[in-house]
Amino acid sequence: MTNTDPSKPAILRWGILSTGHIAGVFARGVAATSTGKVVAVGSRTAASAERFAKEHGIAPEHAYASYAALLADPGVDAIYLATPHPEHVEWAVKAASAGKHVLCEKPAGMNRAEGEAMIAAARRADVLFMEAFMYRCHPQTAKLVELVRGGAVGQVRMIQASFGFYCDFNPASRLWNKELGGGGILDVGCYPMSFARLLAGAAVGKAFADPAEVSGAGQLHPQTGVDVHAAATLRFEGGIVAQIATAVGEKLENNARIFGSEGWIEVPHPWIMSTRTGGEQVLRLHRREKAEVEEITTSGGNLYMLEAEAFASAWRAGARAVAAMPPEDTLGNLAALDRWRAALGLRYAADAV
């Protein structure tokens, strides 16, 4: 898109807030784009910031030993927020207040109230905000929406999706520590929830849908109280039902299926299509009256490259939402996750605010 605003730089200049694993993955994704560049990093310590800067080609003078110093850098246009979940709301609000556009790792907040706070801050500051569901930016996801809207499986009746993995128990780690927002629902259960809402919406001609009913069950860890594994049943408009599951203590299938009156779609890899070089992904369409399975192929690059490009495109256009994951969708997802957690009796400190 042609840049019609002479005040904008030629490319989107990114600052990375926090230096954990996902921050490095995103930085490598940006490096693969022609629309952006990582120009600064902020960490809790100088050593961590300097290490990250060296690894990702950031000038030493833009490796900051505090998040606040990163936000004060006038050469940064947008912040990629990669802290643990409970810190998202504080730094998303501060980044927006500093005039920075915000790409916030999922889940955007610990609950809907935190999501509302950060989105309100972005709107007050007139900056772009997006929750970082990278799979939403892949062509495979767009093809799924197209197939469902086009009636490829007839009337959608049921959606199934799971995302779970096995991780050894460590009460100090992010995944198992309740103070750090541990557990499956917030860490990866947010993916199948967002998937179900996206496809249930597509089935009725909407961008997304919010469930009328949410019920759930799961196992809370006896020591730390986080959800080890959990499942939920969602009921949507038009009688659509979704079954979703997550885990940090068990490896699940990590796939998805969409069943309709005329057939079903199998999605072998709905979340991590390919984070490095991209490549082809295959959807399998089973039509009720055909013995042959139709394979539908999509191609896409590095997931985090696609996410960074989608964000930069919206920024260049002067938008305040990225079509792949607009703020209203984020709020609906957080609200549904709140209801899922409530069914398990899972509460975090943020829920008491």
Image: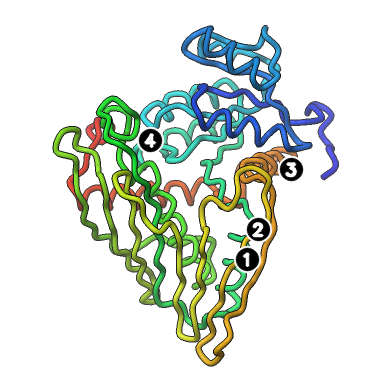
- For disc 3, the marked residue is 317
Tell me the SS state at disc 3.
loop
Amino acid, disc 2: Pro
- For disc 2, the marked residue is 139
Where residue 200 sits: x, y (%)?
45, 67
Between 218 and 274, the one lying in front of the other is 274
Tell me the SS state at disc 2.
helix
The circle drawn on residue 114 is 4
The quarter holding residue 27 reads: top right
- Estimate how packed mark 1 is, as few (under 14), some (14 to 19) or many (20 or more) residues with alpha carbons within 10 Å: some
Q: CA distance from mark 4 to mark 1?
A: 32 Å
Q: Earlier in the sequence, mark 3 or mark 1?
A: 1
Q: Is residue 55 above or below residue 216?
A: above
The quarter holding residue 315 reads: top right
Pick the quarter of the image with the C terminus.
Answer: top left
Amino acid, disc 1: Lys
